[in-house]
Amino acid sequence: MKRRIALIAHDGKKAEIVAFVKEHFEIFSTMALTATGTTGGLIEQTGLQVNKKLSGPNGGDAQIAAMAAEGLLDAILFFRDPLGKHPHEPDIQMLMRICDAHDVPLATNPATAALLLYGLAQQ
């Protein structure tokens, strides 16, 4: 069964998540990917297939949180920009709370994402 992973990145981290996906392309190519709209479009340019949701500020974070709550995701990689202001911060906090409540692994930076990704690939 394919692992189901969601990818999200704030605007200041989109290039970083795309570089991360390219660096780990072989692992990602074995997974079912979901992403927020803009991030998903950028990841699709790597040649991977992505189930795109709305952009984060338009409800994409909430859509991915709902998937996590329903048990439809094995992990979420959310490259957050800790220095930026985000008008949809309540949605971000809700996503993190859902991950904690439903025991869904959540990585918010490349170092943790790599550990999580390799852990999923080993299972």
Image (spheres, rainbow, N blue to C red):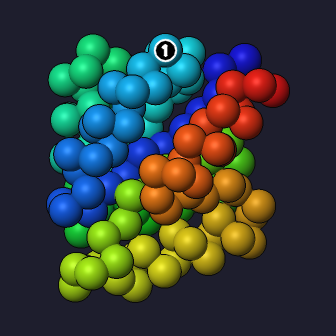
Around disc 1, counting alpha carbons within 10 Å, would you say few (fewer than 14), some (14 to 19), or many (20 or more)?
few
Q: 48 above or below 87?
A: above
Q: Please report the residue visible at 56 percent of the width from the left and 15 percent of the height from the top.
A: 30
Asked whether residue 98 is in view, the answer is: yes
Task: Tally the marks.
Answer: 1
Residue 56 versus residue 107: which sits nearer the camera?
A: 107
Q: Can you say which quadrant of the picture contains the N terminus?
A: top right
Label 1 sits on residue: 26
Q: Please report the residue visible at 34 percent of the width from the left and 19 percent of the height from the top.
A: 48
Q: 38 above or below 63?
A: above
Which corner quadrant of the image does residue 56 belong to?
A: bottom left
Which corner quadrant of the image does residue 112 belong to?
A: bottom right
Q: Please report the residue visible at 42 percent of the width from the left and 74 percent of the height from the top.
A: 92
Residue 28 percent location from the top left of the image: 49, 24
Residue 71 percent location from the top left of the image: 70, 48
Type of amino acid under label 1: Glu
Q: 102 above or below 120?
A: below
Q: Can you say which quadrant of the picture contains the C terminus?
A: top right
| Direction right: furthest residue | 123
Secondary element at tag 1:
helix
Left or right of 66, for residue 81:
left
Q: Please report the residue visible at 42 percent of the width from the left and 45 percent of the height from the top.
A: 7
Residue 52 percent location from the top left of the image: 32, 38
Asked whether residue 72 is in view, the answer is: no
